[in-house]
Amino acid sequence: MAHIHLIKKDNYCIIQMDREKANPMNHEFVAEMRIALKNLQDDDSVHGAIINGKENFFSAGLDIPELFTYDEKQFDNFWHNFLEMVADLVAFDKPLIASINGHAPAGGCIMAIGCDYRVMAEGNFKIGLNEIPVGIVVPRGIFDLYSFWIGRKTAFQYLMEGKLYSPQHAKEIGLVDEVVAADKVLEAAENKLKFYLQFEQSGWRITKRQLKHDLLESMHSFTEFEMKTFQQQWWSEPVRNILGKFTENLKKK
């Protein structure tokens, strides 16, 4: 695969994201991540996994400049697959750790909260859901996933403000679980995974499935009406203007 590499380590695997500088998610990236998760779920020799980013970036989220060029069919296909990827993360019943090496806004944050435990690099990095300021609608399932970790009141207020957090603030509200030096993130993630793997795995996985059952149901509840509403907002003139300016600013950097 071009953007997702699987690195086998004893009885677990590192899912190494590798697309451009900041791991922006396009159709190919999402498709490869789904394949990787399915392969690891089905591989009995793999007992757990870590999703690892790159220096200074876990993932910048959706590849807005590329998505901005998609036609309606392409965008519909991408969005369905992105939501299914998030559901795949929640449904992955083996221990799954996010190794957050740097920034993780928007879709990067969504991928991280699909994991069971998050280790983030200390420093001038940001994590959170900032879709509202650019006019993107946040599905109910994503809100439920967000609030699963930080509570519904905090999730609602911060989501509606498009708020991003520093690593330390994210730890204080429960969005991340550890904040360590940037060169220790993967090591800390591996240590946590090994801690989980010391337990009897059948019982661990059954318990995880039960505790996340309602959350997974919510992830699969995205209706056609919600999809239509989401698309209408995406293709609306105000949002196209915002995304167009965002894309132009990125090209200048």
Image (tube, rainbow, N blue to C red):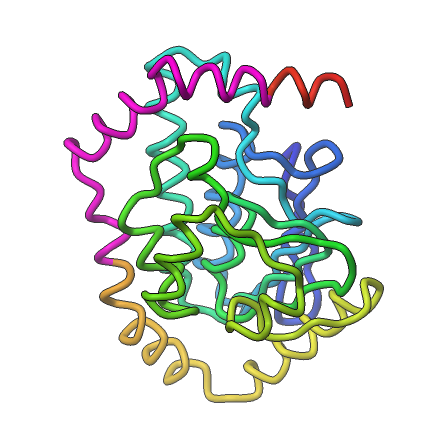
| Horizontal side of residue 113 vs 228, given as left or right | right
| Horizontal side of residue 98 vs 190, given as left or right | left
Quadrant for the N terminus in the image: top right
Q: Residue at x 39, y 11 (%)?
A: 71
Image spot of residue 211 (x, y percent)? 30, 75
User: Residue 52: which quarter of the image?
Assistant: bottom right
- Which is more toward the observer, 190 or 99? 99
Image spot of residue 99 (x, y percent)? 66, 61
Q: Residue at x 49, y 21 (%)?
A: 242
Residue 132's place in the image compared with 46, above or below, is: above
Image spot of residue 62 (x, y percent)? 53, 34
Q: Residue at x 33, y 16 (%)?
A: 236
Q: Residue at x 75, y 17 (%)?
A: 252
User: Residue 7: which quarter of the image?
Assistant: bottom right
Considering the whole magenta stretch, tell me its main secondary structure. Answer: helix
Residue 176's place in the image compared with 251, above or below, is: below
Magenta residue span: 217-246
